[in-house]
Image: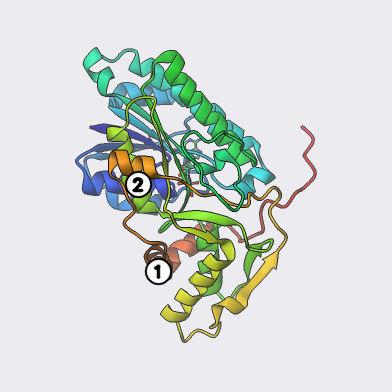
Amino acid sequence: MKILVTGGAGFIGSAVCRLLIEDTDAEVVNVDRLTYAASPEAVASLTTSNRYRFEHTDICDSETIDRIFREQQPDAVMHLAAESHVDRSIDGPEAFVETNIVGTFKLLQATRRYFERLPPARRQHFRFHHVSTDEVFGTLGAEGAFGEDSPYAPNSPYSASKASADHLARAWHHTFGLPVVMSNCSNNYGPYQHPEKLIPLMVTNAMRGRPLPVYGTGMNVRDWLFVDDHARALWLVLNRARPGEKYNIGGNAESTNIDLVRSLCSILDDLIPNRPHRNHADLISFVTDRPGHDLRYAIDCNKIRRELGWKPLETLASGLRRTVKWYLANHDWCERVRARGYDNARLGVLEPAATP
Ligand code: NAD
């Protein structure tokens, strides 16, 4: 089985590529534009495999995507390429509209052109897996969880762009018969996540004795999932979901942001006790909240557990410890990401809208 993975040099996409090459016999064509968020190091170990190929391409470049489909003849698409950081979507929403909406539209069209020319036997097994987020459902109060049929109510430019992409993918199934499967997942964490995201930001700042900026009161709740557990779920959905089907994926691991940051601090206290910054929790500082910050996300993932037999292998405690250890051991990777232009600046603070 040959799979065209978009965004395969990103945080989750690279975990998917590693899973496919290391634990299955699938072939992978990784299509990635290599934005600031990409980490070529995360797929460097795969480049010696003759089942792995990298195409440095923008999903909006239809001509090149058509050429890749023609030459590579994939059996499936796993679509993960996206602009993914909510704070950046507040500062610069246009890139989110461009990649997440227009890019998904163009990819769906290219896939359709390819799919419609496939012989019937190959068409029957072809899948387009659209990878999305629980943020499309908006925010929850203290109770309840998002199900597959929860109404869409995106609140940030990021989640609105992902919601739009979900609707396009759904429509391409219903109108054009493209065999789309979809999944909406909760917050991921693990190795190779860009240090602008909450967990790596806190760990890398704490390692350097820098303040740990917690938004608002820190009482926002997220449901955390270790990235390799997500990758395994995606592989199952790709292989087992019927066209038109969607699955929610989550870790059943809710935590307030402040509790999460305190947990990271105590893991660091334990792993690097002789640092001058112990107790690391003393570095916590509360900063102005993110505009429109959703209060709580929680995922009901009974459907994928029941129908596909998936469950996460990491608990939040084991996954966080594993992640902190990885960042401690890969300090040079964090430095390289910083050297590529990330300076820890606070993002997503409201500025007046730019004139067009
Ligand atoms: P990421 O930002 O780490 O990686 C995105 C990758 O897409 C990068 O390698 C980037 O170079 C590539 N890319 C961006 N624009 C592109 C374009 N126009 N053409 C080709 N490649 C492009 O993102 P991630 O955290 O790995 O998320 C992957 C997917 O999973 C996204 O669709 C995201 O919405 C979804 N998701 C993420 C989470 C999470 O917690 N990170 C949770 C649920 C769903």
Q: Nearer the viewer, residue 189 or 33?
A: 189
For label 2, the SS is helix
Q: Does any portion of residue 62 appear in the rendered image?
A: no
The mark that comes first in sequence, 1 or 2, is: 2
- The single residue placed furthest to the left in the displayed view is 25
Position of 103 relative to 329 (above/below): above
The image quarter containing residue 190 is: bottom left
Position of 25 relative to 330 (above/below): above
Total labels: the figure holds 2
For label 1, the SS is helix
Identify the colour scheme used: rainbow
Identify the residue shown where x is 56% and y is 69%. Answer: 205
Identify the residue shown where x is 30% and y is 48%. Answer: 18
Q: Report the disc number at residue 321.
A: 1
On the rendered image, what quadrant is the C terminus found in?
top right
Q: Position of residue 251 (x, y in %)?
A: 41, 53
On the rendered image, what quadrant is the N terminus found in?
top left
Q: Are marks 1 and 2 in contact (CB under 8 Å)?
A: no
Q: Position of residue 3 (x, y in %)?
A: 30, 33
Q: Nearer the viewer, residue 255 or 346?
A: 255
Position of 91 relative to 5 (above/below): below
Q: Looking at the picture, which amino acid does disc 2 mark?
A: Ala
- Mark 1 Cα shell of 10 Å, populated few (<14), some (14-19), many (≥20): some
Position of 287 with respect to 300 (left or right) is right
Q: Looking at the picture, which amino acid does disc 1 mark?
A: Arg
Q: Which residue is mark 2?
A: 231
Identify the residue shown where x is 44% and y is 47%. Answer: 10
Position of 146 with respect to 112 (left or right) is right
- Mark 2 Cα shell of 10 Å, populated few (<14), some (14-19), many (≥20): many
Position of 334 with respect to 120 (left or right) is right
The image quarter containing residue 126 is: top left
